Amino acid sequence: MIRSAHKKLFRRSFLFGIAGTAALVALFNSCNDTGTSPYAPSISYKRPGVAGLKDQAIVPDTLIASGSGVINGYSITPPLPAGLTFDTKTGRIYGTGTVLDTPGTLHIVSASGPSGTGTAKVIICVGEPAHVCDTRAPYGPYTQAFVWTKPNVPMTPDTNLFLPLGGRVTDFTISPALPAGLTLNPVNGIISGTPTTVMAAKEFIVSVIGPFGIDSQHVSIAVLDNAFPVRLLEKGVARFQGSCTGCHNSDGKGSPGATPPLFKSDYLMKDKSRLIRIQLLGIPNEADTATTIVVNGESFTSQMSAQMANDSDIAAVLTFERTLLNGATDFISPSLVGHIRDSLLTRCAQIGPNCGWGIDTTH
């Protein structure tokens, strides 16, 4: 028994030695010939925007180094305002600014190491009570939250209105990546270009980045088949913005527990005829729908009045909601709306005055 126990202990020690050796080999292989990390430094500042008052010491700003890149020293360009000091060993910024710089200056800090260089951005602003530094977070809505075009047709550029509405902007990024042919200008945020293939509507998030915050803007873009009747979308977006945003919000996402979402709505995508009936009769109505509807698993009891609109208007707004808010690739035609309107007139005549909120007989 004792000999058997010794064998087991030896086997475990041997295996542990192999595993430990493998770990050391892996660690050694991750280093270059000098024994240092092969990765360039990765750095950022705790505060990417520093606002101070003239002749008063700023709160020191320090660097955060992430990753395993070795750092030998730091440099900064352009030089800091008079009175402020940059520590080339630690990257720390401190001191008392003696010259006004109220717009603020963007500085690039470089961390140099044997395997490369990492950079970080920081804006330094020196103000006084009469000329306060602008420390507002950026705010950058787009001229169009919903954009569409067709393959090989240049998209109307979507412009970001960041300049007069918020704080300073240093960069724009977008997620997910735009389709082939479309680009985001990282300096002014304009989305433009000529897409090459069809793409169902997709929501993109543009990050409007500034030294004192980040603003996120949502833009839906669709590249439609050449046969798609874009005139319906043009009319539909106008009607949506004029009639629907008061309850469902400008992004169509509604209000949890109060107003159902039109954006990414399973209810909106299930039954075209039901959507048309709701437009014509409202909610609730005895002809078609129950008092409670379930959207994406959530129950709603909010009411909606019948829409006094012609066939084309109803087809347009429903096509917009299904296409731009939900990624549908088909459309609702005015003729389908007209057909259902006629069938409801007959049905409501049989039900009587309790048939919804009333129905417009005009096509």
Image (spheres, rainbow, N blue to C red):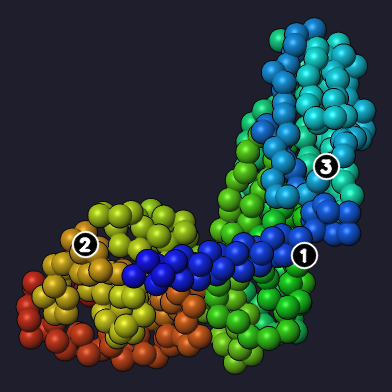
Residue denoted by label 2 = 300
Helix, strand or loop at mark 1: helix
Say above or below: 113 vs 86. Answer: below
Q: Gap in Å between the C-alphas at discs 3 and 2?
A: 57 Å
Q: Earlier in the sequence, mark 1 or mark 3?
A: 1
Indicate which disc residue 71 carries: 3
Q: Which image quarter: residue 83?
A: top right
Q: Position of residue 256 (x, y in %)?
A: 30, 55
CA gap, disc 2 to disc 1?
60 Å
- Mark 3 / mark 2, whichever is N-terminal: 3
Q: Nearer the viewer, residue 288 or 87?
A: 87
Horizontal side of 287 relative to 324 (left or right) equals: left
Classify 10 Å Cα crowding around label 1: few (below 14), some (14-19), many (20 and above).
few
Please provide percent x and percent y for residue 81. Answer: 88, 21
Q: Is residue 307 left or right of residue 30?
A: left
Pick the quarter of the image with the N terminus.
Answer: bottom left
Dot 3: what SS?
loop
Q: Is residue 46 left or right of residue 15?
A: right
Left or right placement of residue 226 versus residue 304 in this view: right
In depth, the one of 311 and 283 nearer the eye is 283
Q: Residue at x 60, y 64 (%)?
A: 17
Residue at (16, 67) in percent of width and height: 292
CA–CA distance between discs 1 and 3?
20 Å
Q: Amino acid at mark 2?
A: Phe
- Looking at the image, which residue is at 51% across and 67% down? 10
Near mark 2 (Cα within 10 A), the count class, few <14, some 14-19 or many ≥20, is some
Q: Which residue is mark 1?
A: 29
- Give x and y (percent) for residue 216: 58, 50
